[in-house]
Image: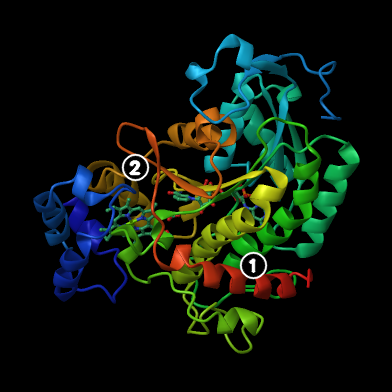
Amino acid sequence: MALQAAYSLLPSTVSIRKEGKFSASLKETTLTGFSFSNHLKADKISTLLTFKEQRRQSPRFSTVTRAQTVATPPANEASPEQKKTQRKGTAVITGASSGLGLATAKALAETGEWHVVMACRNFLKAEKAAKSVGMSKEDYTVMHLDLASLESVKQFVDSFRRTERPLDVLVCNAAVYQPTAKEPSFTAEGFEISVGTNHLGHFLLSRLLLDELKKSDYPSKRMIIVGSITGNTNTLAGNVPPKANLGDLRGLASGLNGQNSSMIDGGEYDGAKAYKDSKVCNMLTMQELHRRYHEETGVTFASLYPGCIATTGLFREHIPLFRLLFPPFQKYITKGYVSEEEAGKRLAQVVSDPSLGKSGVYWSWNNNSSSFENQLSKEASDAEKAKKLWEVSEKLVGLA
Ligand code: NDP
Ligand code: PMR
């Protein structure tokens, strides 16, 4: 029943006739982020488908110091001699005022090993959110950042530098999703808002903060950009129309300002596709950063799909029926659901777990909540596209 209703949420372009196509492509896809062949029986899939329907935190400021390994193998394999005492880490998390970002901030703060800079567009909301989850004042700082304005991104970077805190980990987490918008809306500089915020804002932020990361003396410096299964067309979720597709980036190259097109591929505006495209950009950017900077800087670049956190504010602009049915659909039908708390722990692992220190990886978790290196779709791992995206994005944000 719930599933039937969920099916009705499918965009009109999906029809029963598409079942065959879905079934045919399933063998090479993943469902909740891990491979079908290993974890799910084909009949279960077909049943599913036939339902169709710091001030620099020097050691003297640090109240908590804890042994942590520098190397990437699991922490429990390190001998006490290999461990070294270190200062508290500083992690900047964008969009930490709700959902995944807030849950991650909380998880990190609770360890006593991290100071979280909550980089948020709504200062008061972020303060209230931090209080509401019981974060202690000394574990976080709220700083203003509106990713829908490149000027705001630059101001944030300046303000952050002035705090003289080290930057040990940057988490690009914030996002907007406008699935029901009939017309595009635009950022301060005139870019379609989903790609403008989720990709271009983070692109500029990550480029400007790379120097700060380089300067950090923290043993494991990381930059994480949150991706998603829905941008990966090698998964069932990624095959729900409209599918992500950046095409030859002609719309992006022409400014994404609605004059020629507000879509990266130059097509008609579609808010859901714009979001998925932006997630492909996030995953491509992570890999391009890895190729360009990992060896030189030692920074670990990573992306992830934390699971389907069906209850977050991301779906605030979706129709009420969707918001009602999406959580049970993900909980009971796809089994892809994770709570905000669990997802926050996952992202916190990517921030700080020594065993997740490998660079260039797109992390996912299986149903036992064990992390694994997942495969990106063909498009989301296309090195040539990543390079082109990088060059076009540099021009748009004024870096080239
Ligand atoms: P939420 O809507 O709960 O959180 C998004 C955050 O981004 C909010 O804090 C929001 O701020 C912030 N934000 C939005 N626009 C801007 C802006 N212009 N400047 C600064 N901050 C902004 O959604 P989620 O927690 O679900 O999403 C977090 C990340 O997880 C996203 O990258 C999303 O793509 C990804 N993700 C989510 C999944 C899910 O199932 N929910 C699945 C896979 C990936 P404010 O509070 O002011 O609105
Ligand atoms: Mg999806 C089979 C597994 C699966 C998973 C893990 C997700 C995750 N979804 C799955 C399947 C399906 N979804 C199926 C079979 C359908 C058709 C009924 C379906 C539909 C659907 C819609 C309409 N799903 C959605 C939407 C959204 O609007 C969400 C979206 O695409 O946001 C971009 C969404 C999502 N499904 C997910 C996840 C994680 C999302 C949202 C968040 C995101 O990718 O960031």
> To which quarter of the image does residue 151 belong?
bottom right
Residue 323: % across, % down? 38, 52
**Figure check: 294 above or below 182:** above
Q: Nearer the viewer, residue 67 or 118?
A: 67
Residue 161: % across, % down? 86, 44
User: How far is disc 2 from disc 1 in space, using C-alphas?
Assistant: 28 Å
Residue neighbourhood size for the residue with mark 1, other residues' Cα within 10 Å, grouped as few (<14), some (14–19), many (≥20)? many
Asked whether, in this view, residue 344 is left or right of residue 2, the answer is right
Q: Please tell me which residue is depicted at 63% across the width and 56% down the height of the picture.
A: 289
Residue 279: % across, % down? 51, 60
Q: Secondary structure at mark 2?
A: loop
Task: Give the residue number, with chain letter if any, for mark 1.
Answer: 196
Q: Which mark is residue 315?
A: none
Q: Please tell me which residue is depicted at 48% across the width and 79% down the height of the picture.
A: 247
How many discs appear?
Answer: 2
Task: Give the residue number, with chain letter if any, for mark 2.
Answer: 337
Instruction: Assign ligand 2 to one image quadrant.
Output: bottom left
Q: In this view of the protein, can residue 12 be seen by the observer? A: yes
The amino acid pointed to by label 2 is Tyr
Residue found at the very far top of the displayed protein: 80
**Colour convention of the picture:** rainbow
The amino acid pointed to by label 1 is Gly
Residue neighbourhood size for the residue with mark 2, other residues' Cα within 10 Å, grouped as few (<14), some (14–19), many (≥20)? many
Q: In this view of the protein, can residue 319 be seen by the observer? A: no
Q: Please tell me which residue is depicted at 38% across the width and 70% down the height of the picture.
A: 243
Task: Confirm if mark 1 falls within 8 A of ligand 1.
Answer: no
Q: Nearer the viewer, residue 107 or 84?
A: 84
**Figure check: 92 above or below 229:** above
The answer to whether marks 2 and 1 mark residues whose Cβ atoms lie closer than 8 Å is: no
Q: Secondary structure at mark 1?
A: helix
**Figure check: 117 above or below 153:** above
